[in-house]
Image (spheres, coloured by chain):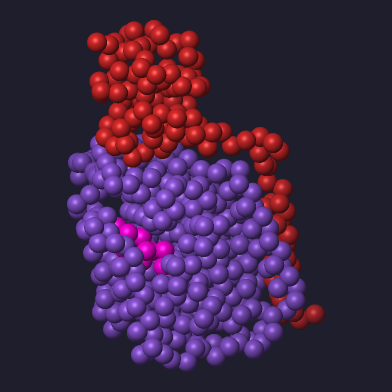
Amino acid sequence: MTSALLLFWPLLIGFFLTRALAARCGFLLGICFGAGLGVGVVSCCFFLDRETGVPSLLFEALVLAASMAACRRKRQASPPHDTIPVAWWLMAAFVVVVAGALYSFQQQVSQYRLGSWDAWAIWNLHARFLATPAWRDLFSEAIGWTHPDYPLLIPGFIARVWTLQAHREFATPAALAFLFTFGTIGLLGTSVSQLRGRAQGILAALFLAATPYFIAQGASEIADVPLSFFILATVSSLACRQAALAGVCAGMAAWTKNEGLLLIAVLLAVRGWRKQGAWFIAGLAPVLAIVLFFRFTLATSNYYFGGRPAGEMLSLLTDPDRWRVTGAGLFRYAGWFGGLAAYLGLAGVDTKTHRFTLLTGFATLCLVLAGYCAVCVLTPGDIHWQIDTALERLLLQLWPATLFLAFLAARNPWYDAPQGNA
Amino acid sequence: MTLSGIRRTAAAGLVLCLAAVTSREQLTRPRRPAGALDPLPLIVERYEQLQVDLPSRGVVCYLSDVDPRTEQGSAAYYLAEYSLAPLVLRIGTDCEATVGSFADPGKAPSLLERNGLEATRQYDAGLMLLRRKR
């Protein structure tokens, strides 16, 4: 209960920060963005607290006050409401799927109170260190197996709540997992709704809630679903031409998992030269500064790249057998994409209305996926084990953003959806 | 029915099938048997007994009769680290204090003898606090 209550504070910070960066963002969309963004802000503030000794609350209050002040100055009308009614059967299907997802999530977190292996051996273990004055001991070589180079968004937030609670509740990571799992579904639904109408938004959210692997991974309390939230948030805010907000979200992706750095590099390569590039970098810079400070001053060497000769990595990268194994893994785990392709085949697609967004969005996701495959090929361990344990989760990170772009392009077979709120 | 009507009906059918199939999967996924407890929180609670006798931070060693290179052994070691964090547990016996975790407490005396250790305190379920023999 306390954990749930403590989630309102980051929600408040995140909501106002979203409204400050994206003045035309609707109320619901602001809540969905704010849920994840607020957690990220609180986590960054807590890290600054640990590093500088200045109380986290002071940094958080400053961000909130600045965001509220910016909101007052920049207030603009929200986009017009979509008044076309949603078919009862679609609404009923959505409610049934979300209810099933909620039940499944609740069952999993109550049966596995510490979360999955990676949750307690990595993310929640890091939080246990961060919540104490001995937090720097996390970077001890003796426990290098816990991947101390992983960024601190998730453990930082959990540790912040634990320091307020004065004890380490198992419910806190579970509440955070709930927020990101259902926050991602909400963010997908509301962001598609803003651009393509409510019915299309509900369809997109239904497809995500109907991905059992997404719910299971969300409930397992690891960082892949939170990362998928920030990748979706970045892609959708770029689609709404909110480059500063996209920059903050991309920074938060890098503060969640190392894969976020790849996303930033790809985004800068694909879109960096555009007019809004300066706004993107302005939003990105403060969070990226924290990520880079962490990487260069605290984080230990990376499992994939640390201390390996370039020649060895080059020979792995040019080994066709390793690429074949990775390609086969992609086909094995990409089953959910089949259902989406079947739907798009029936509904049809319109690539003209959001042409630039679709082109750059899909290019970004494809390049990030290529990067993920290259990392699998480069793994210093057994590649089959790597594919079996990591590839499906890597695909999942890109799934909500893929659904966003797909439903931006999909024709709505039942309605003439309003277009062009972007 | 026109071609667009057929496509519309098929798309609706696909969405409804998806909803039905996934909801069924979510509701019927295998669960832990009723009454069966999650063992991990119990293990964490077990280790919490040691906290009063250990320093609040620093490095202590970890010794077990289960090889930490096996999946079972590494899980036991990782759980011990999780439970005792922010204390750093290092596999070995050359620290001032060593946490002993024995799945089979009968194996403890020979293992202690071989490593030149003695128990300073014993807890439930095969847990011991150890130090070097003086």
State the predominant SS element of the stretch in magenta: helix
Q: Residue at x 29, y 47 (%)?
A: A133
Residue A244: percent from the left, percent from the top?
33, 77
Q: Residue at x 41, y 72 (%)?
A: A13
Numbered range of the magenta stretch: A38-48
Which chain is rendered red in the image? B
Residue A51 appears left or right of A411: left
> Residue A237 versus residue B78: which sits nearer the camera?
B78
Residue most extreme to the right:
B1
Residue B18 x %, y %: 69, 61
Q: Is residue A175 visible from the viewing direction of this image?
A: yes
Q: Is residue A43 left or right of residue A211?
A: left
**Quadrant position of the N terminus of chain B in the picture:** bottom right
Determine the image quadrant of residue A118.
Answer: top left
Q: Is residue B66 left or right of residue A100?
A: left
Q: Nearer the viewer, residue A183 or A192?
A: A183
Query: In the image, A128: left or right of A26?
Result: left
- Residue A227 higher or lower than A319, as above or below: below
Q: Is residue A47 magenta?
A: yes
The percent position of residue A214, horizontal first and vertical second, equals 55, 56
Give the color of chain A as drawn: purple
Quadrant assignment for the C terminus of chain B:
top left
Residue B42 x %, y %: 54, 33
Query: Foreground: A49 or A176?
Result: A49
Q: Residue at x 48, y 10 (%)?
A: B106
Residue B114: name its quadrant: top left
